[in-house]
Image (spheres, grey):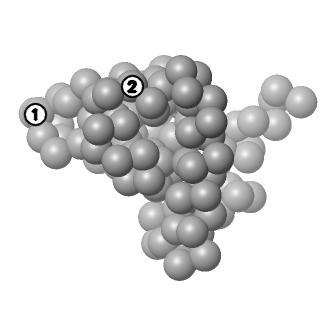
Amino acid sequence: MLGHVILAELDAEHPVSFSRKIVQRVIRGEWGYQGLLVTDDLTMGAAYNRGLCDATVRALGAGVDLLLIAYDHDKYFDAMHCALQAAQRGAPDLPLPEHGSARRLQSFR
């Protein structure tokens, strides 16, 4: 689980939970971790106060596999709407469904 803490030495701008630098370069790259990555709850202030849409799209774009929305379950629909809009706009950082996350989720079938 990726928390919403900022590791300033690695990415002073974004929390770990939606930092492409940390997810791709450190966790997937340097550490070689290929398992599932899930955010901490996106309705927590540290993420939510930055904007649910921004957090959602950035987390998916960073390569996070699952987005946790636990505290306010109605926000799930807002987050998925944001993700769908970004995909329809052709957001360059959103991964294709047949890559990455889908492959990692296969073992949970």
Does 30 appear above or below 1?
Answer: below
Please tell me which residue is depicted at 53% across the width and 78% down the height of the picture.
89
Query: Which residue type carries mark 2?
Result: Met
Residue 25: where, in percent of width, then height?
33, 44
Q: Viewer-proximal residue, 46 or 8?
A: 46
Q: Earlier in the sequence, mark 2 or mark 1?
A: 1
> What residue is disc 1 on?
9
Please tell me which residue is depicted at 45% across the width and 33% down the height of the picture.
42
Which of the image's four quarters has the C terminus?
top right
108 relative to 40 in the view: left or right: right
**How busy is the neighbourhood of tag 1: few (under 14 within 10 Å), some, or many (20 plus)?**
few
Please tell me which residue is depicted at 61% across the width and 58% down the height of the picture.
81
Judged from the image, the secondary structure of the residue bearing numbered disc 2 is loop
11 relative to 67 in the view: left or right: left
Does 39 appear above or below 71?
Answer: below
**Residue mark closest to the camera, 2 vs 1:** 2
Q: Viewer-proximal residue, 95 or 48?
A: 48
Residue 86: where, in percent of width, then height?
52, 68
Please tell me which residue is depicted at 62% across the width and 63% down the height of the picture.
84
Q: Is residue 25 visible?
A: no
Residue 11: where, in percent of width, then height?
18, 41
Residue 33: where, in percent of width, then height?
50, 30
81 relative to 16 in the view: left or right: right
The quarter holding residue 4 reads top left
- Measure the alpha-carbon separation of dots 2 and 1: 23 Å
Circle number at residue 44? 2
